[in-house]
Image (cartoon, helix red, strand yellow):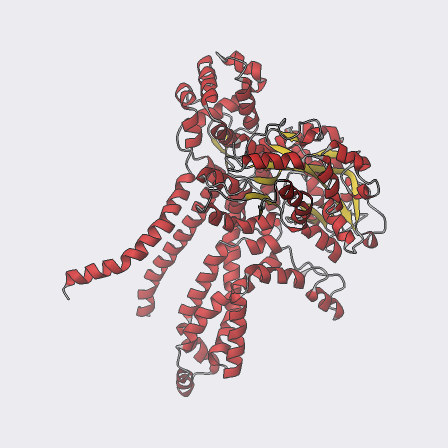
Amino acid sequence: MSIRWKSLIAGLGVTVLALPGLAQARDFTIASWGGNYQDAQRTVYFAPFAKSQGDIRILEETYLGGLAQIKAMVETGNVTWDVLMIERSDLIVGCDEGLLEELDWDAIGGEDQLVPQAVHPCGAGNVVVSTGFAYDPARVKEAPKDYADFWNVEKWPGKRGLRAMPKSTLELALIADGVPLEQVYEVLATPEGLDRAFAKMDEIKPHIQFWEAGAQPVEWLAAGDVVMSTAYNGRIALANEEGRDLAFVWTDHTYSMDSWAIVADSPNKELAVEFIKFANTPEPQVEFPKHIPYGPTNKQAVERLDPEASKMLPAGANMERSLFIDEQFWADNVDRITERWNAWIAQ
Amino acid sequence: MSRVSLYLSTLLLVALPVAYVAFLYLVPLGGVALRSVDNSTIHANLPATASAIDEAGAPSDEVAAALAKDLAAADRRSLGELARLLNLDAPGMRSLLLKTKRALDEVEVKGLADLRAIDPDWDEPIYWQALAENAQPYTFRYYATAIGLDRDPAGGWQFGAEGAIYLQILLRTFWMSLQVAVIACLIAYPLAHAIANGPPTVRVLLLGAVLLSFWMSILVRTTAWVVILQREGLVNEALMALGLVREPVQLIFNRLGTLLAMVHVLLPFAVLPLLNNMKQIPAQQRDAARSLGAGPFESFLRVYLPQTMRGILVGAGTVFILSLGFYITPALVGSPGDQLLSYYIADFMLKQLNWGMASTLSVILLACVLLGLAVAWLVNLLWRPAARAA
């Protein structure tokens, strides 16, 4: 879950954080995404962990995505965070560039207890975040069922909300164009496939309203600004708990994982390892979706989920038609494709 | 006081501000400029490859062995960074280098065949060309991308299929800033006039309103526009209630909304210099002009307006320069087609970790502003004697 415009604002803050501070002998510090996401983590992870370690003090910070801040910390030798919750794309690049510690998987409970996609040399996947599309049933005559319907502007006139980035959007264009899920990245890797994706994007270009922050689709759907919009499943579920009545389409949703990782040269590495070990266990993981509707990564936790509650979670039957975002593909191709994307938007 | 001691005391007085500007402004600025051509990460970590490879990047056993030696010696942090940088020139090279490095633990690379055994992609000339192009400690890669140049297969430069996207965005940045400056001045002029010459209660109220919005956070003011202009927002509800439109009008997430919000955020910067200027113009001048036979329009045009030119220029100039660096407001109320260059600088800096590209775009923006100032200064220089002679 990336909150992009907030991270823009935080750009100013990066400079301030990069200034040398009091780094030695500080409290164990965890950085996460703020809001009710971090509130849920505090209840489920931070507080019980602090207690189990003899009532240690845990400092919390807010992280807004990207690697600029972590790079600044590691390069100036002023590492002020120990553990952070990081998006998969940043996890992969951060790991390759030595900005994150490599994990000893035996010390954090072994690879086997998590689903395979959650295992990475530098991070333990903890939260499954899904992006499907949502609409307000009161504002449409007939329910749209899949991305072919999302692209059908004749039957469902109105603006479409899409995230303002090529990653996870071009995939949808290919899916809407009839490419089977398992071939999406194969096709996207070829020049013809990329042309095909952009040609499909052309079809709805005048109808797109791009979002940057996860809260925007919910606001827009509620205000009737857009007829359908891609959105994080958790945002829609929370909006519905607060009295909205939005429908979420799970067919062909894309999903990724937020992982716990340790900042390179963390002075509290032992505690950080203990924390991730605790976070990988089924008990807190099965508790977490009760506070915020995102899916667990521990295999036992997945099985123990309440079937009624898991209807709004990226778990169980909802995962039957889903695409795991291929972050390796994007790490290799993001510069090239982003340039074309920017040019496409400017046309 | 002798002349020498006068110079000395002046020098002492400016020493602190000069040191301040030099260290906190010019040094970082120089750092940004250096970063826009810096290629030391690649050069410093691939020394053997750089000396072994020829300009065309022809693969040979010798180069392959040199590359393997460099990769084996590179630590994780620098290898990751150099792989990401080379990936800018040759998509896919990131994975290729990391995979090769991992394989080196088990395989000894003596020649090309061993590299090809690790990954057949080493057959592709594009990767060897990328190595050859980066054999120097400096690079013009970022400037080339900024003006829309691509590598052609022969190793030279060609105009890319996408066109000069960043130059287009730069042009858009200047055009939108100019629009904001002109609109802001058109609104600020009567407002400043009312504050300068109106009855005392009106003056206090208006000045208070301007200053209040000046002190409020940009973010708050920008989000307020979202509420006002959205599809079912205040303006659209009012228009529909009055029967002026049947369907809600798209007022935000487009150019219109962006300009509206930017003008509002920057309005105080146009009002305050104008107000300062207008307050210094004696009210009697208007009476004098009128008594000499000028109508209200003529007295404004020939007596009042010329005296406020300085206020207009300072106000418009300030708004224009500030607009050039805007990114929060367009990011919140604009469509992707309304983003200014700063949006892309922030994106490269924070999201894509491409600090070279961010630096290059900053340098280009700064250079354009300096060029603009130089032209303005020249025009001013040439225009003045002509105006005096007339």
- Tell me the quadrant of the picture where the C terminus of chain A can be found: top right
Of all residues, the one furthest to the bottom in this rendering is B291
Which residue occupies 43% across, 69% down?
B273
- In the image, what residue occupies the spot 45% across and 18% down? B69
Going by the image, does A126 lie left or right of B309?
Answer: right
Q: Is residue A187 above or below residue A254?
A: above
- The residue lying furthest to the left in this view is B2
Name of the residue lying farthest toward the right: A142
Q: Is residue B291 above or below residue B232?
A: below
Residue B308, horizontal then vertical, whole percent: 42, 72
Relative depth, front residue between B220 and A210 = B220
- Depth check, front residue: A54 or A236: A54
Q: Is residue A53 visible in the rendered structure shown here?
A: yes
Identified at 49% across, 72% down, the residue is B189
Q: Position of residue A313 (x, y in %)?
A: 77, 41
Q: How many marks can you see?
A: 0
Residue B181, percent across and down? 50, 62
- Residue A234, position as x, y percentages in the image: 73, 46
Give the residue at the far front of this rendering: A54
Task: Work out which quarter of the rendered image holds the N terminus of chain A and state it.
Answer: top right
